[in-house]
Amino acid sequence: MSVRMMGAIAACAALIAGSSTELQGQTTPPGVTRTDLQRHDLSIPGREVMQATIALAPGATAPEHSHPGEEIIYVLQGSFEYRVAGKPVRLEPGGVLFIPAGVIHSAKNMGSGNAVELATYVVEKGRPLVVPAR
């Protein structure tokens, strides 16, 4: 995917969402914006797929959480440091990451501009997408 196309995707998502800060009744932390792009039932009973862009302002952190299914991440813009099961993973644009179901993780914007990822979730239908770590 070209840099121009990635920029267009991020800009489109921002226009569609504005400043969306809520997903299924859950408030996102300051500096974190989630924009739902699509959600569909799968042919696997009880499962659905959901795609969203997640943007973190400079220095912002998405605190520790998990999902009731797998998360596949593609970094569109900026510099992220993820902590997956306590281990650091640093990604730049074009970087990818797979997070298994139920694994606790967090993300932090390590750059001076916005960091944006495309997240694809394959999750159990009807459950909250984000489960805060205790």
Image (cartoon, rainbow, N blue to C red):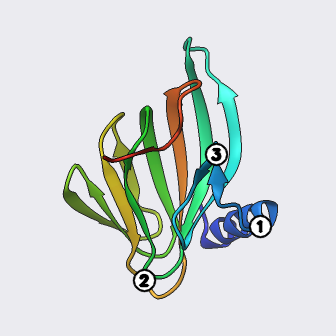
Mark 1 or mark 2, which is nearer the start of the sequence? 1
Q: Rounded to the nearest whole Å, what is the CA distance between mark 3 and mark 2?
A: 29 Å
Q: Residue at x 65, y 54 (%)?
A: 22
Q: Residue at x 31, y 46 (%)?
A: 134
**Identity of the amino acid at label 3?**
Gly
Vertical placement of residue 28 versus 99, above or below:
below
Q: Rounded to the nearest whole Å, what is the CA distance between mark 3 and mark 1?
A: 17 Å
Q: Which residue is mark 3?
A: 25
Q: Rounded to the nearest whole Å, what is the CA distance between mark 2 and mark 1?
A: 22 Å
Position of 81 compared to 10: left or right? left
Vertical placement of residue 98 versus 80, above or below:
above
Position of 4 compared to 68: left or right? right
**Residue extending furthest left?**
87
Q: Position of residue 87 (x, y in %)?
A: 19, 57
Residue 62 position by quadrant = bottom left
Q: Position of residue 47 (x, y in %)?
A: 55, 21
**Identity of the amino acid at label 2?**
Gly
Mark 1 or mark 3, which is nearer the start of the sequence? 1
**Identity of the amino acid at label 1?**
Gly
Label 3 vs label 2, nearer the camera: 3
For mark 2, does the 10 Å Cα neighbourhood hold few (<14), some (14 to 19), or many (20 or more) residues? some
Q: Which residue is mark 2?
A: 111
> Secondary structure beneath disc 2?
loop
Mark 2 or mark 3, which is nearer the start of the sequence? 3
Q: Which residue is mark 1?
A: 18
Q: Residue at x 32, y 52 (%)?
A: 105
> Secondary structure beneath disc 1?
loop
Q: Position of residue 81 (x, y in %)?
A: 33, 68
Label 3 vs label 1, nearer the camera: 3
Label 2 vs label 1, nearer the camera: 1
Which of 24 and 81 lies nearest the eye of the viewer?
Answer: 24
